[in-house]
Structure formats: C-alpha cells, structure tokens
Image (cartoon, grey):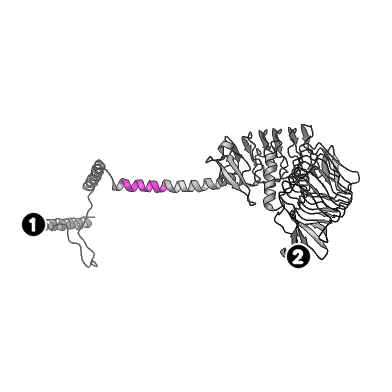
C-alpha cells in the first residue's frame, strides 16, 4: 500500500535513534574467554564453568542443526548472543531441553528458518531474538517464558499466529514490529503494559481486544495496521474504554485509536475530547470528513497521516498544537480553514504551534490562510512535497538530514500560496530553503512609519540638493535675466531717491571725533553764496519775530 513509504521512513528513523537492536553486542565478558572455546566443525562452544557450555557461534553455511544436550562431558545450557546471527541458509534447528537461556539477537537474520520450539526452561527472550526471521511461521514458545525484550519478533513477516504463554508478564517495545502476516493475538492475563509500536506495521491484524488488566498502551502501538477494523476493551478495565468502536481513556478526553479499516466516511470528535493521540487516525482512507469539537487542544504526531480521503478541514480556535506530520500525505485535501483567520482581530487568541511537515505532501492543497495567533511554524509544514523520481537531481530539490542521520528530499509545491500575518508566517517563508509564495494580510505600521520617515528625509535632502545645483549650475540665460532684474531694481531705487531727496544741513555733533568729510568740496563762490543765503534766511526770521 502507498503509505508503506511512510512506515519504511519511520523504521529508518527508529533504527537511527537506537530503538532497533544493537546487533554488535557480545555475550557476557566472563563467558567470552577465547581460550575456553572449542567447536565441532559446525558449532562453537564457550565453557561457562566446569560442567556447562553455551553455543556461541555457527558456520553460516549450516542448513539443519540439532543441538545435543551435552558435548565432551559438558551440559549445553545456553545459546549466546548472536550465536546463529545471519545464518541465512539455516532451515531447521532443534534446541535441547537442557537450554535455559537464549541471548540477545540469537537468531537474528535467519531468513530461511521456518519452525522452532523453545524449551520450557527458557524464561526470557531477549531483544531481537527472532529479528528478521522472515520465513518463521511455526513457533512454539514453551511454557516458561516470562518476558520479551524489544523487537523480539521484529520483521517476522511470515508469522500469522502465535500463542503467548500464560507465564508471560512483560512485553518490550516493538514486540511484533512489522509482523505483516499476523492476523490475531491474545495478550495473557499477567501482562499489564503493551509497549510502544508493539504492532507497528502488522498489515494483516484485523481485530484487537484490550484485556482488563492493561494499564498502559505505548505510543502508536497500532500504527500502520490498515486491516484493523475492530477495537474493544474488556469490561472492568480502569484505564481504557471503547465507544462506538473507537478507543479512549475512561474520561474520553484522549482519543487513542480510530480503527483504520472502518467503513464509515464521516466522524465527529466527541465534545469531551481534548487530545487526538499520535497516529490515532493513521491511514483511515475511507474517512472523507472529520468534524472537530470546539474544545480540542492537541492534534498528535501522524494523527491523520495518509488519510487520503479527507477533502476539507476546519481547525477550531481551541487547538494550540498541530504536531509533526499530523496531516501529511492527505493527498485529497483541497481546503483547510483555521477558525478566526478571517476575523477582524486576525484570530488572536491562544498561541498556535504548527510543527514540521504538518501538511507535507498535501499535493492538492493550494492555499492556506493562517490566523494571527500562529506563534511557530516548523520546517516544510506548508507548501512542500516529495519530488518525483525523475526530479531528484533538480536544483529545486532540497535534501534534508535529520538529527538521526536519515535523509528526505523536499521540493516546493508548485502554485501554492500561504496567506498570513507578519511574524511566524512571514518568518516561515523567509527562512525556508524552498520557494513559497506568501501574501501578507495585515498592515505593518512599524515598517510604514520607518519608511515614511525615510522618504520624508529623502525628499528634504533632494530639495536642498536641487536648490544648490540650481544656484551653482544656472544657465547663461538665467544669469542674464538675474542681472537684468538686479539692474531694474537699482534704477527704481535711484528714481525714488531723486523724487524724495534727503536734506542734510551739514551740522555735525561736537562729540564726533572725526566728522564725516563732505562728499564734494564746492568752489569758494558757491560756498559764499550758500552762507549769504543762510544769513538772509536767519535775518528774515528775526524780522518776523519782531512784528506784532
């Protein structure tokens, strides 16, 4: 199925972060003294003490092996770490009842092994015991096993059914990881916890019942189970409840699992649900419409990944987190509405975080309008998709390397437009290494003020510059006109002075240290005439005073 690409990518990540098995582990140091080993041509034995040995190695060309209960006077009581690892031609193996211990990854990569019986004396199957035993279809675990390590049956792709012993108490993470043929499994009464990714990639699993005593179901325990149509909970379970074939906590505030093989096309999230758990609706391909309640707060990682039937979404204002890949690979999605994005206040409210790859590979989603309350957007959350095989060398393709070392190729979704506000949305586009079209819907007054002031200063500077230039670079005609204008003003002033002369009697203050020299020295005769006139004027004045 098409979402197997996502499962494979996730598996690579898990390997990189160490959830898969460290296949290079060795048997206990006190049991590895090379001077205490011997072989029979096929198997290598390590002496544990004076009476016991462990099988610690096997020639990779062996096809059918029957381990004897003793050799050379030693009881064979254990199979060491990786004792049969990568014996790809081994088809059958008989283990004697004297064996009580089987080490980590003991049968890792025995891809031809079809059947095996575990002795009743074995109490623990360590991590990766049967990892990648891809032909193993008939397995008898005996009656004494009490615990499973991580990934104990990982990639046992031919295992269709398995009876777990009543003595089992503990199951590690990824117990049945990618057991693609497993159809049904019953959990024994003493087991209280189902580990993370326990049934990840169990493509044929059709139903599952949560036992009464189960207290914890790990993260994404049923991720990638496309045939799972029924989920139920035994009566009396204090932690989980199944309502209308959907798994919740007892308060129904957390929606854990919507079986992906349900035939319903619509679903309404109940009012009490605050959290949609990681992987809850993963690959629910029949679902065409999901209605969220107005109190929902959290949408988990891969919650709706590969829900290709969804065509539209409305995200309520109550949601504060949309986790990584929450709606990735929803290829039928054409519309996403964030409530409040068109409000006058821009949808201000509780901050909304949208994590990386949230809407990755939504190839028909061409426009998204974000509310103002978006506080953070992770890389490649919008407007990005995976390149086609013939585009992987294109300059527009970006290769992303995660912290775990896995790689992913990304390119911009052609024609996509993100509409939003300055802040997180604008920063997302600016910082992206692929080309995303962005339309800003708010007015940035701070930026406007800055540019307005800058423009005003520029206009003033320009005006001053023009004035200086005009003064220093006037044309010859302008200079002639200026001189003519100045000459006309001078003539006008001279005429006004001639019509209205200013009288000066020649007297000077006795305190003047240096009396002004007359502008022109008159000839003697003219000076005398001027004195006589002045005297006559004085006499006339006296006569006038004497008359009654």
Residue 42 position in % (x across, y down): 74, 53
Q: Do we see residue 42 in this rendering?
A: yes
Q: Which residue is mark 1?
A: 525
Which residue sits furthest right? 236
Say which mark, if any, is on residue 458. Answer: none
Residue tagged 2: 30
In which quadrant is the C terminus drawn?
bottom left
Residue located at (81% from left, 37% from top): 206
Principal secondary structure, stretch drawn in magenta: helix
Q: Which residues are magenta?
A: 460-470
Give neighbour class at mark 2: few <14, some 14-19, many 20+ (Cα, 10 Å).
few
Q: Answer few, some or many: residues within 10 Å of disc 1's Cα (few below 14, many 20 plus, some between 14 and 19).
A: few
Foreground residue among 96 and 293: 96
Taking 270 as reference, is 515 above or below it?
Answer: below
Q: Earlier in the sequence, mark 2 or mark 1?
A: 2
Comparing 152 with 388, the one in front is 152
Q: Secondary structure at mark 2?
A: helix
Contact? badges 2 and 1 (CB < 8 Å)? no
Disc 1 on helix, strand or loop? helix
Q: Quadrant of the N terminus?
A: top right
Is 190 situated left or right of 259 in this image?
right
């Amino acid at each position: 199925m098409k979402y197997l690409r996502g499962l494979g990518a996730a598996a690579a990540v898990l390997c990189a972060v160490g959830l898969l098995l460290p296949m290079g582990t060795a048997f206990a140091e006190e049991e590895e003294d090379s001077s205490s080993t011997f072989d029979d041509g096929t198997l290598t034995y390590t002496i544990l003490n004076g009476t016991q040995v462990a099988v610690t190695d096997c020639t990779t060309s062996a096809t059918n092996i029957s381990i004897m209960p003793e050799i050379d006077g030693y009881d064979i009581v254990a199979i060491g770490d990786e004792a049969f690892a990568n014996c790809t031609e081994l088809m059958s193996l008989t283990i004697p009842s004297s064996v009580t211990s089987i080490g980590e990854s003991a049968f890792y990569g025995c891809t031809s092994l079809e059947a095996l019986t575990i002795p009743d004396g074995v109490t623990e199957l360590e991590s990766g015991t049967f990892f990648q035993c891809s032909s193993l279809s008939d397995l008898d675990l005996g009656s004494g096993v009490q615990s499973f390590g991580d990934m104990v049956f990982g990639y046992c792709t031919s295992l269709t059914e398995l009876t777990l012993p009543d003595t089992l108490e503990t199951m590690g993470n990824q117990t049945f990881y990618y057991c693609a043929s497993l159809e049904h499994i019953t959990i024994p009464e003493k087991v209280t916890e189902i580990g993370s990714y326990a049934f990840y990639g169990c493509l044929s699993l059709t139903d599952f019942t949560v036992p009464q005593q189960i207290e914890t179901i790990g993260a994404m325990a049923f991720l990638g189970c496309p045939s799972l149509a029924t989920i139920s909970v035994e009566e009396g379970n204090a932690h989980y409840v199944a309502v209308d074939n959907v798994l919740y906590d007892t308060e129904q505030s957390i929606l854990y699992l919507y079986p992906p093989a349900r035939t319903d096309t619509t679903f309404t999230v109940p009012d009490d649900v605050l959290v949609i758990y990681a992987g809850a609706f993963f690959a629910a391909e029949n679902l065409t419409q999901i209605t969220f309640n107005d109190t929902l707060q959290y949408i988990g990682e891969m919650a709706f990944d590969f829900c290709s039937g969804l065509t539209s979404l409305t995200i309520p204002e109550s949601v504060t987190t949309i986790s990584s890949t929450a709606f990735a690979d929803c290829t039928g999605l054409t519309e996403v509405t964030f409530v409040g994005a068109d409000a006058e206040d821009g949808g201000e409210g509780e901050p909304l975080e949208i994590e990386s790859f949230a809407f990755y590979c939504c190839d028909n989603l061409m426009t998204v309008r974000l509310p103002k309350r978006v506080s953070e957007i992770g890389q490649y959350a919008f407007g990005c998709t995976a390149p086609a095989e013939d585009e992987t060398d294109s300059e527009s393709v970006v290769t992303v390397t995660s912290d775990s070392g896995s790689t992913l190729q990304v390119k911009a979704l052609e024609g996509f437009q993100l509409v939003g506000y300055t802040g997180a949305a604008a920063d997302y586009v600016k910082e992206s290494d692929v080309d995303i079209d962005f339309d800003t819907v708010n007015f940035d007054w701070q930026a406007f003020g800055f540019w307005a002031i800058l423009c005003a200063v520029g206009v003033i500077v320009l005006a001053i510059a023009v004035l200086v230039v005009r003064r220093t670079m006037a044309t010859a005609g302008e200079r002639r006109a200026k001189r003519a204008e100045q000459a006309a003003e001078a003539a006008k002033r001279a005429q006004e002075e001639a019509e209205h002369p200013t009288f000066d009697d020649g007297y000077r203050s006795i305190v003047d240290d240096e009396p002004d020299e007359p502008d022109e020295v008159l000839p003697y005769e003219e000076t005398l005439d001027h004195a006589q006139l002045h005297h006559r004027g004085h006499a006339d004045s006296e006569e006038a005073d004497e008359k009654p």
